[in-house]
Amino acid sequence: MSEATCAADTASVTGLILSGGGARAAYQVGVLSAIGDLLPDAAHNPFPVIVGTSAGAINAVGLACGALHFTEAIRRLANVWQGFHSHQVYRSDWAGVVSQAGRFIGHSLLGMGKELPVALLDNSPLRDLLGRELDFSGIGAAVARKRLRAIAVTAFGYESGQAVTFYQGRATIDPWFRHRRVGVPTRLELDHLMASAAIPLIFPPVKLNREYFGDGAVRQSAPISPALHLGATRVLVVGVSGNPAGAADELAAARQQTGRPPSLAQISGHMLNSTFVDSLEGDIELLERINRMNQMLPEGATPRKLGLKPVEVLVVSPSRPIDQIAARHRHELPRALRFFLRGAGATKASGAGVLSYLLFEAGYCNELVELGYQDAMRQKDELIRFLRLDCVTAPVAAAAIPQAMPQASA
């Protein structure tokens, strides 16, 4: 890229969108690892704006906490995901599973303990893990040194019915209010992450101020919009779709071969996909249509005045069906949980959809990390162009990196 092009591009702001998806978010770490290997400067953060939802929010905040040394933050994330076991995320022992199942039945069917949030699994181990691994003070330091413009996580308010984006960043960023979508400036804490990652019914909601919040993907009809509100002019989206276009015929054939009624696990898998995957893909399609409309505008028309501001989008998503990967690793599910999920059909290949969100085990997560890495490397040239990494080469060699990088990244 020419020096003139790089100079003209300094006003643009790149946003990173990490969607939800439980254990599927391991794929994101593989993509991020590839980006880390492509960076000319290991400390450089190519994403001034980082937005995450659900498990993607955990990855997003992990990056933001370490934004002063980006590749080190990626390495820490990779170490956690590649060594994952379910007991680090939720109680998977017999005593924990049985007691939580009893509380769930008592609360849901018998009306007992209504003052406690209802959930199938106890995810208190995840709180302990995040408390050990994340240093939230790193966010403020990165913002102060202009290595980060903003970090945001989205959660769903069960009483208000709103998708609330909690963001921490520069004081110049104004909150926003849209239909069932609001942006609230705050100092991010552990509770915001636990709320954003609280998959409905599976993990308990979290009380923030006076309202209980759950997984932000539930009512996030426009997952990309928070990044735009925070100042991003182009966005890299790392999706976790389980049905890549190339596998559509294969998946359709598999569905035709089974004439049996859908199991509870199959139904749950489709519901989770509609929550975590469909809204993101629909939002991407909408942006692409707006970009095409901009190209068709007559000369002299101003896209900004028409509300059609173009946004450059690059998507990295799985090239292989994640459901099939989960099906191969279903034997890794802890024995106690396998026993309780057998009746719902989650331990069968046909129920691998729901399993793909809950299988926090090393074998499954490592395969997703590797898939993400390979998919990103297949788009190596596109990533280098999109992230303007060839523009970072010149400042890397300079002695005064701390002074040069904030200007380039903001």
Image (tube, rainbow, N blue to C red):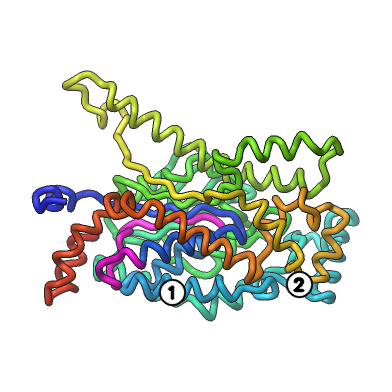
How many angstroms separate mark 2 from mark 1 (CA)? Answer: 27 Å
The residue furthest bottom is: 132
Number of marks present in the image shown: 2
Question: Residue type at mark 2?
Answer: Ser
Give above or below for 365 relative to 307: below
| Label at residue 92 | 2
| Label at residue 294 | none
The residue furthest left is: 4
The residue at the point 73 percent across, 40 percent down is 254
Mark positioned earlier in the residue sequence (2 or 1)? 1
The residue at the point 73 percent across, 68 percent down is 332
> Magenta segment: does it hold 46?
yes
Give the residue at mark 1.
Answer: 75
Left or right: residue 8 compared with residue 340: left
Question: Residue type at mark 1?
Answer: Arg
Residue 327, x across and y down, in percent: 72, 56
Left or right: residue 63 compared with residue 206: left
Residue 80, x across and y down, in percent: 54, 74
Is residue 87 shown to the viewer in this render? yes
Is residue 140 shown to the viewer in this render? no
The residue at the point 41 percent across, 53 percent down is 378
The segment highlighted magenta reads: 37-54
The residue furthest right is: 110
Structural crowding at the residue carrying mark 2, measured as other residues with C-alpha within 10 Å and reported as few (<14), some (14–19) or many (≥20)? many
The residue furthest top is: 298
From the viewer's side, name the closer residue of 173 and 264: 264
Give above or below for 278 relative to 301: below
Name the quadrant containing residue 390. bottom left
**Secondary structure of residue under mark 1:** helix
Name the quadrant containing residue 196. bottom right
